[in-house]
Image: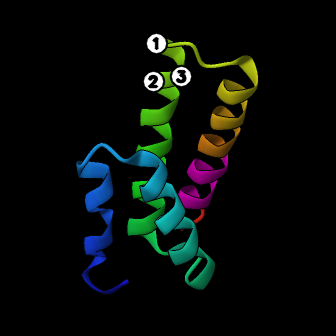
């Protein structure tokens, strides 16, 4: 995704769309640090929203797991 301008969805408060685009980008380039960092920020935002609202335990656990996986991917860079 040239210029990484696709992450405007995060700025537009559309984290789910952002995650979908990030998954596509990371499938093509799994070690892209900017995409991983943006995914981490997006997942953290979703986790905060789930914790503050009516998120289910499954949703929160899934988000925590995905945050940990993303942090691990960043740490191996």
Kindly check if marks 2 and 3 are in contact, taking CB atoms under 8 A apart as contact.
yes
* Residue 65 is a magenta residue: no
Kindly check if marks 2 and 1 are in contact, taking CB atoms under 8 A apart as contact.
yes
> Where are the magenta residues, as a range?
69-75
**What main secondary structure does the magenta stretch of the protein show?**
helix
Front residue (pair 65, 54): 54
For mark 3, give the secondary structure: helix
**38 up-or-down from 52: above or below:** below
For mark 2, give the secondary structure: helix
Q: Residues within 10 Å of mark 3 (few under 14, many from 20)?
A: some
For mark 1, give the secondary structure: helix
Q: Residue 62, percent across and down?
A: 71, 35
Q: Residue 68, percent across and down?
A: 64, 42
Question: Residue visible at 56% across and 74% down?
Answer: 24
Asked if residue 70 lies left or right of residue 15, the reply is right
Kindly check if marks 3 and 1 are in contact, taking CB atoms under 8 A apart as contact.
yes
Residue picked out by circle 2:
49
Residue picked out by circle 1:
52
């Amino acid at each position: 995704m040239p210029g990484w301008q696709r992450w405007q969805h995060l700025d537009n408060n559309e984290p789910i769309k952002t995650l979908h685009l990030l998954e596509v980008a990371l499938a093509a380039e799994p070690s892209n640090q900017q995409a991983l960092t943006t995914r981490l920020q997006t997942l953290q935002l979703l986790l905060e929203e789930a914790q503050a609202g009516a998120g289910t335990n499954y949703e929160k656990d899934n988000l925590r797991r995905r945050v940990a996986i993303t942090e691990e991917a960043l740490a191996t860079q």
